[in-house]
Amino acid sequence: MKKELQIIVPPEIAFNEVKLHLYIQKILQLSENDNFVLNLKRRSIDARSREIKVNLSLNVYVNELSNEQLLYEIPKIDVSKSPCAIIVGMGPAGLFAALKLVEQGIKPIIIERGKNVKDRRRDLAALNKMHIVNPESNYCFGEGGAGTYSDGKLYTRSHKRGDIQRILEILNIHGAPNDILVDAHPHIGTNKLPKLIENIRKTLLDSGAEIHFNTKVTDFIVEKNQMKGVITADNREFLGIGVILATGHSARDIFYLLEKKKIKIESKPFALGVRAEHQQKFIDQVQYHCENRGEFLPPSSYSLVQQTEFEGKEKGVFSFCMCPGGIIAPCATETGEIVVNGWSPSKRNNAFANSGIVVAVDESDWKDFSSFGNLAALEYQKSVEKNACILAGNTQKAPAQKIEDFMNSKISSSLLDCSYTPGLTSIDMKAVLPLPVYSRLKAGFKAFNQKIKGYSSNEAQIIGVESRTSSPVRIPRNKETYEHIEIKGLFPCGEGAGYAGGIVSAAMDGEKCADYLVKLYK
């Protein structure tokens, strides 16, 4: 007998397997002789009132075996001698494009400028401890892309782009925890992602795919508006039936190369701001309405948005990539710039909570960079990052300011303890940020303090700059075929092409590009 249940229970039942089984046994009036299996389908926390509840959707099988199983299976196919397609970049978009190509009998040749996940760690350590930026191996470049060492959040609103459940199942079968299949806001954690990425690599190699690390694309092979392949820094040519360009939002050299080759690109709006860091305990208290969240509730998050006005124009200020129990990381990809982002370990057990607080920027903001044409937004982004680095003494010590001091235009005489390992420099953010962004952030923090009392106090601080929220460049493509609008055989893909925002949406975009590449080839 199968029972489908929708129940609302306290956290101590929802997150305790033994208590949940006893609760189900009681409400279904099952005897001690009845054997039953629970298959949890969905779990979400409702913290709108002081009495926290958890919504559960589950199937209960009584005196029969559960017949539920994952739909995805690791492909058992050899594509080593099949036609080849080139994938540039080994982030979520590139990895899932490669898996999709294998399923359809095409051999992926993946070209990754950075190192494998294990070797990347040394470069991240050098960046955090010695302020040394390796332009080919950092938080943005390398196996797994920016997502590998920056959190692993799997929430997306892009339900129309592809099969989200399929993406989650592929991650799960390669090592992600079962929780990602049921939680409303699934999360893996930076400490668990590297092993998962290694498992996906093994699946690809076992299927006959090629992977080339430490290999940088420096040119495209284009004949009569048809992309034939790529040339790498060591003068090797890689040819294939198509090229999926999945280089991520920070591969600026690729944008410059596209512009040089007269392959159409365009500036794209993005968001710019800072990271706000609070004590996680404070966020828990205001979100859960209690002094201590206890052992069952996970560290709490928040989502904030406020419309602001500057010189008669309204724009949003909003929280971005909120990391409960998280850490702020240095994400520069070149010497002479400061970029920050956030991530959380799987248990989200760090003492701090951080979130990007950013402002939408568009052509009205980068009008002074219009001489750069299609790269105007990129150059505007670069200028802010370089200015931050100069003001911080040309190190990775990030500019910072307590939030109440920021509101009062006062340089902080001292700064708080922080999760950002390279250290902080006390600077007035007015000198760091463009005036429209600075002014809107001040209005945003004023409104956020009304929504969350104490949010904008001097018990919290902002760290700059959060500038890589998305790509400042879009590579336009045909809506029907996903090919570049002018160059046949070129499939701009994922965040770097301006068509995704996060691991799941990038993965789905990678699958779509692979699908269309195969369809056009066949």
Image (tube, rainbow, N blue to C red):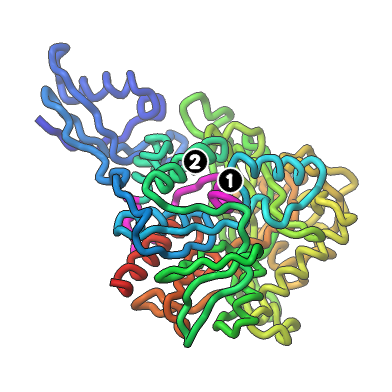
Residue at the location (66% across, 78% down)?
Answer: 375
Residue at the location (48% across, 71% down)?
Answer: 492
Camera-side residue of 445 and 429: 429
**Residue situated furthest left in the rendering:** 1
User: Could you tell me if residue 410 is visible in this image?
Assistant: no
On-image quarter of the N terminus: top left
Check residue 24 for magenta coloring.
no
Tell me which amino acid carries mark 1. Asn
Query: How would you classify the magenta stretch by its main secondary structure?
Result: loop
Distance between the Cα atoms at labels 1 and 2? 8 Å
Density class for disc 1 (Cα within 10 Å; few <14, some 14-19, many ≥20) is many
Rendered position, 89 above or below 452: below
The magenta stretch is: 142-166
Please state the horizontal and vertical placement of residue 497, each as a whole percent of the image.
52, 70
Tags 1 and 2 touching, CB below 8 Å: yes
On screen, residue 383 versus residue 476, left or right, reads right
Residue at the location (63% across, 69% down)?
Answer: 218
Tell me which amino acid carries mark 2. Glu
| Mark 1 vs 2, N-terminal side | 1
Query: Which element type, helix, strand or loop, lies under badge 1?
Result: loop
Please state the horizontal and vertical placement of residue 88, each as a whole percent of the image.
52, 63
Please state the horizontal and vertical placement of residue 331, each as a whole percent of the image.
69, 53
Report the disc number at residue 198: 2
